[in-house]
Structure formats: C-alpha cells, structure tokens
Amino acid sequence: MKKKDLFKKLLSRESETKADQNGARMIINAGYPKDTCLKNLTFLSKKNYTDAHTELKSTHPGHLERYKSLKTFIDSHDKEVKTLKPYKWSWKYNRKQNTLTFLPQKQVHD
C-alpha cells in the first residue's frame, strides 16, 4: 500500500471517529441516556459481524477502537454538559414574509 493511500485511510478513520462523536453529542443533548450510542454501536457490531480490530486497509476504525474512543468522548462530554445552563430563546414573526424565526440567545456557562 502506498503512503498516500494509507494517509487517506487514516484521514477517513479520523472522520468516522468525529462523526461518532457528533452523533453522540446530539443524542446526549436531546436527552437520551448517555450510553445509547455505545449500546447501538455494540448491537450493530454483533448484527453485522463487524471486525473488532482496525485493519490497515480499512476506511473505518474497528469496533474496539470506535467503542473506546466514543466512551472517552461521552465521559468527557457528560462533565461538560453538567456545567451548562439551559438555553434562553425568543421568537420573531415577520408578517410580510410569513416566517417565524427561532432566536437562541448566547448560552451562559457556570
């Protein structure tokens, strides 16, 4: 395998890890239990017989790498979420354009 191809695979695996983290962030912020993504990842791995270890030629991290990375992220994100106050917002209606706009205000940290 060429170095160029290997670099592309590594970059793709990093993108997949970031996608896992973004998905977990949305799930947690939506109010679901923080282990929801980990349970789904395990379920899909068993259902699809996904390889546990990351293969050199793979564009995706293996199950064990994804699980460990996601668990680390969720543990740190949980601590981060506890320090945030709820959002404040307002609505703005424009009669001429018949639009209703949701306007979140800046979130305040403790």
Image (cartoon, rainbow, N blue to C red):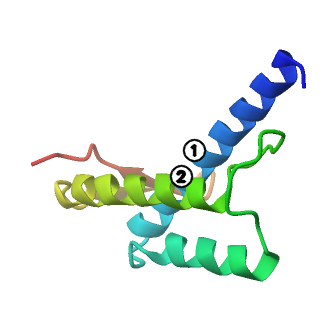
Name, please, the residue furthest toward the top. 3
**Place of residue 56 in the rendered image (x, y in percent of width and height, measured from the top left):** 77, 39
Q: Nearer the viewer, residue 4 or 74?
A: 4
Quadrant assignment, res 33: bottom left
CB under 8 Å between callouts 2 and 1? yes
Q: Could you tell me which secondary element the residue under label 1 belongs to?
A: helix
Q: Residue at x 53, y 78 (%)?
A: 39
Q: Residue at x 80, y 76 (%)?
A: 48
On screen, residue 46 versus residue 71, left or right, reads: right
Identify which amino acid the numbered label 1 is placed on. Answer: Lys
Q: Nearer the viewer, residue 110 or 102?
A: 110
The mark tally for this picture is 2
Query: What residue sits right under mark 1 in the picture?
Result: 18
Q: What mark, if any, has residue 22 been given in the picture? A: 2
The answer to whether residue 93 shows anywhere in this view is no
Identify which amino acid the numbered label 2 is placed on. Answer: Asn
Question: How far apart, in angstroms, are the residues tagged by discs 2 and 1?
Answer: 6 Å
Crowd around label 2: few <14 · some 14–19 · many ≥20 (10 Å) = few
Looking at the figure, which quarter contains the N terminus? Answer: top right
